[in-house]
Image (tube, rainbow, N blue to C red):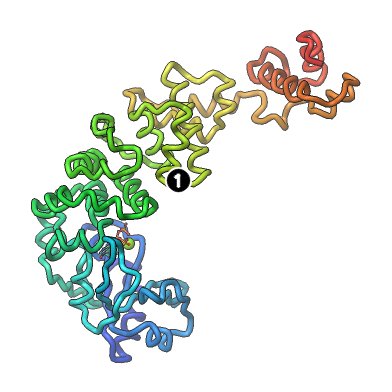
Amino acid sequence: LPLEYQKAIPVLKKLENAGYEAYFVGGSVRDILLNQPIHDVDIATSAFPEEIKQLFPKTIDIGIEHGTVLVLENDEQYEITTFRTESTYQDYRRPDHVEFVRSLEEDLKRRDFTINAFALKEDGEIIDLFDGLQDLEEQILRAVGNPHERFHEDALRMMRGLRFVSQLGFKLEEETFYAIKENHELLSKISVERINVEFIKMLLGNERSAGIHAFIETECYICCPGLREEGEALLRFAELPSVPLKEESQAWTLLISQLDLKENEIRSFLKSWKCSNQMIKDVQALVQGLRQRETGVLEPFELYFLGKEHALQVEELMTYFDETPQMDVVEESYDRLPIKSLSELAVDGKILLEESGKKPGKWVSEALQSAEKAVVEQRIENDKKQVLDFLSKEKLI
Ligand code: ATP
Ligand code: MG
């Protein structure tokens, strides 16, 4: 067992000594079996939330109505969730009510795919009620139980399936595949925020191309914001060099570049995906930078406005346009810029007002911008006298 699990064994023991069942469950068990690093240790137990809280001195209610208690033990945090069934599905969405049960089997039955439905005991025994081990071996994603029913219960599972195709490089089992294809329209019942999370995980997966192909073939893309008519653009996206993407903002940028959105369409596209304002700002900058970069290396002024981080991310994206990114060239060019922001300019508004004796007005920011550009382009030095001479020659002060 990996170290994270070994550290958590006393937590399981404590529950068992009190007469409850307790297991490791969820994606981390799958990841251990795949020899992949794990991010979170999830524990499932027959103890009810109140019972968990009585056993552990430090707990935080993070989703007690869903049966999840966060337990703080040995400087670590563990999400402990009571065995549950989800009995009252409404509108194809995850239910708001869950029923706590004492049976592990009931809990595993409500999980999405066979490879996500293992339970692992602290002695290393794997409980595999749905032949997930065989599917893991054959690299197959198979819904637990009847796929149609499962996607009707919670349509998000379809998007989860597609992102696992991309993350794991597994194939959708045939019945599961056709159930997604037939039910893809149920995705419109799911909140965009939840679809967004899975969509981005799909685009950032190691097998992005396989994920996007499955996204197209199951027709799920039709029910995603702004993609209804974009099957061909998505296909082009799938055909790009298969280097994995690192950042969400880069994924959106590459997608937008395939969709060929106009500058004024980017914001509403990302808004329709419920992206944060910060994400929208970053992506707008990256798309603009990429468009400038595609016609040749960035001019100093373009580099200056883009900023170092964005410029490096843009450079990284050149991989997908069959150019080798030259990260150190960008880094050096950026470091050579005479100023990195307006605050470093040798003059400011106050100086301009004093020197000119004119009244404040729009001319101040116009003059500053011209000086900023001239300094960045090294037409003049960043020196107070040179800047002022330049501005009076240009009749800007
Ligand atoms: P990741 O590695 O990205 O965390 P994961 O499989 O652990 O993937 P989580 O969202 O952390 O995904 O969920 C943990 C577990 O809960 C899953 O492995 C699965 O057993 C179950 N699960 C999560 N979402 C659903 C769902 N919509 N329907 C059924 N089971 C789900
Ligand atoms: Mg997880």
Q: Residue at x 48, y 81 (%)?
A: 58
Q: Residue furthest top?
A: 393
Ligand 1 within 8 Å of the CB at mark 1: no
Quadrant of residue 206 within the rendered picture: top left
Amino acid type shown at disc 1: Cys
Task: Identify the image quadrant of the N terminus.
Answer: bottom left
Foreground pick, 173 / 312: 173
Residue 328: percent from left, percent from top: 48, 28
**Residue on which the image places disc 1:** 275
Left or right of 50, for residue 301: right
Residue at position x 10%, y 66% from top?
A: 131
- Secondary structure beneath label 1: loop
Residue 33 visible to an observer of this rendering: no
Task: Name the quadrant where ligand 2 sits.
Answer: bottom left
Camera-nearest residue between 128 and 287: 287
Quadrant of the frame with the C terminus: top right
How many numbered circles does the render carry? 1
Q: Vertically, is 66 above or below 287?
A: below
Residue 270 versus residue 388 in the image, above or below = below
Q: Position of residue 148 (x, y in %)?
A: 14, 59
Q: Position of residue 275 (x, y in %)?
A: 45, 45
In the image, is residue 341 above or below residue 202? above
What residue is drawn where x is 15% and y is 64%?
144
Q: Residue at x 66, y 30 (%)?
A: 341
Q: Quadrant of residue 98?
A: bottom left
x and y, in percent, of residue 161 in the image:
22, 53
